[in-house]
Image (cartoon, helix red, strand yellow):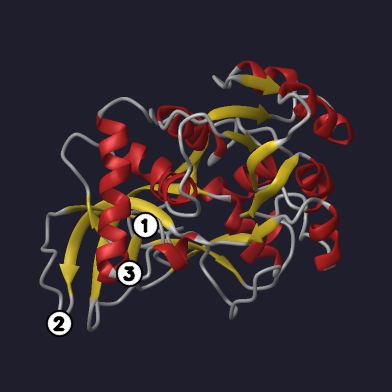
Amino acid sequence: MSAAPWRIVVKAHGGPEVLVAEPFDPGQPGEGEVLVAVEAVGLNYIDTYFRTGLYPADLPLTPGFEGAGRVMAVGPGVADFKPGDRVASGTGKGSYCTHWRVAAAHLVHLPDARASEDAAAMMLKGMTACFLAEDVAALEPGQIALVHAAAGGVGSVLVPWLRAKGVTVIAHSGSPEKAARVSADHSLHGPLDRLADEVRALTGGNGVDIVYDGVGKDSWTASLASLKRRGLMVSYGNASGAVPPISLLELSRGGSLYVTRPTLFDYVASRAELDHTAARLFDRMADGTIRPVIGQRFALKDAAEAHRALESRQTTGATILIP
């Protein structure tokens, strides 16, 4: 690619092949906007949802919510950022590009100690782990959590975060090799149809207090069956497809279960919430609780290849794209 601005664009929903590179003019930042020279982009499963049309969005679209770089210019009304500032985002739209015009409301200042690649690997996934561990439920030491896809982008952050809180973690991964990489109290990798029995065996027949499930359709039944009476099901992703419709009676029969379907965007909706969540993430990174694990690096122009690897569960930790 040339030094001129370019981006990855989706003009029709479909498989990874619909991700194509094209030159573009980002224009000057408008009211409340910032123009960022992108140094690293984070790949997330939510990107595939917009690519396929599972999550609706106007076409053409440039995927991506996660990235880091340096401010080139600011638009009218922007007082918190200036040219030269290092910044990062996990919620700004359209990060698959070399020059990102993004609302200042989605940016945070990047501490000097944090590399752009680490930020791109951690902002969306790390802030997601933060609100899951800290805000969705008031977990206490000694409680037990089941974490699906524990070797993946969010899971690899969520597991150590929960353990630092004193929560006992039962992790589940898609293969023995992935399970071996997970430092949990119990790291499982067996078939999902046996998972609930394994969880019950590990918990004296009681089940877990909370399940964090980013897998979706394939793990839904196992997740509900792994919960203790009045346990909380946190369904935060659809890696295997959308969860099928459920009956409230199913929750009753499972033991008066609770279910929530949270998204990061609702937990960082204000400047104060965004700054607080990012600060907690950076604190956890600074004290060593969270260590960015970049399992794969792809050139941004090879975004289609990166999506294929992600969807075929060939990735571990975070994946970043380099413009």
**Residue 257 in view here:** yes
Q: Which residue is mark 1?
A: 98
Q: Which residue is mark 3?
A: 102
Q: Secondary structure at mark 1?
A: loop
Image location of residue 37, percent across then percent down: 27, 56
Q: Name the residue rendered at 34%, 72% in the picture.
A: 26
Q: Which residue is mark 2?
A: 76
- 169 over 234 or under it: above or below: above
Q: Give the quarter of the image for residue 268.
A: bottom left
Image location of residue 121, percent across then percent down: 42, 41
Q: Earlier in the sequence, mark 2 or mark 3?
A: 2
Q: Name the residue rendered at 57%, 49% in the picture.
A: 303
Q: CA distance from mark 3 to mark 1?
A: 12 Å
Q: Earlier in the sequence, mark 1 or mark 2?
A: 2
Q: Amino acid at mark 3?
A: Val
- 314 over 57 or under it: above or below: above
**Residue 296 in view here:** no
Image location of residue 172, percent across then percent down: 69, 30
Q: Name the residue rendered at 17%, 68% in the picture.
A: 73
Q: Nearer the viewer, mark 3 or mark 1?
A: 3
The residue nearer to you, when weighing 253 against 65, is 253
Q: Residues within 10 Å of mark 2 (few under 14, many from 20)?
A: few
User: Is 102 left or right of 253, judged from the image as shown?
Assistant: left
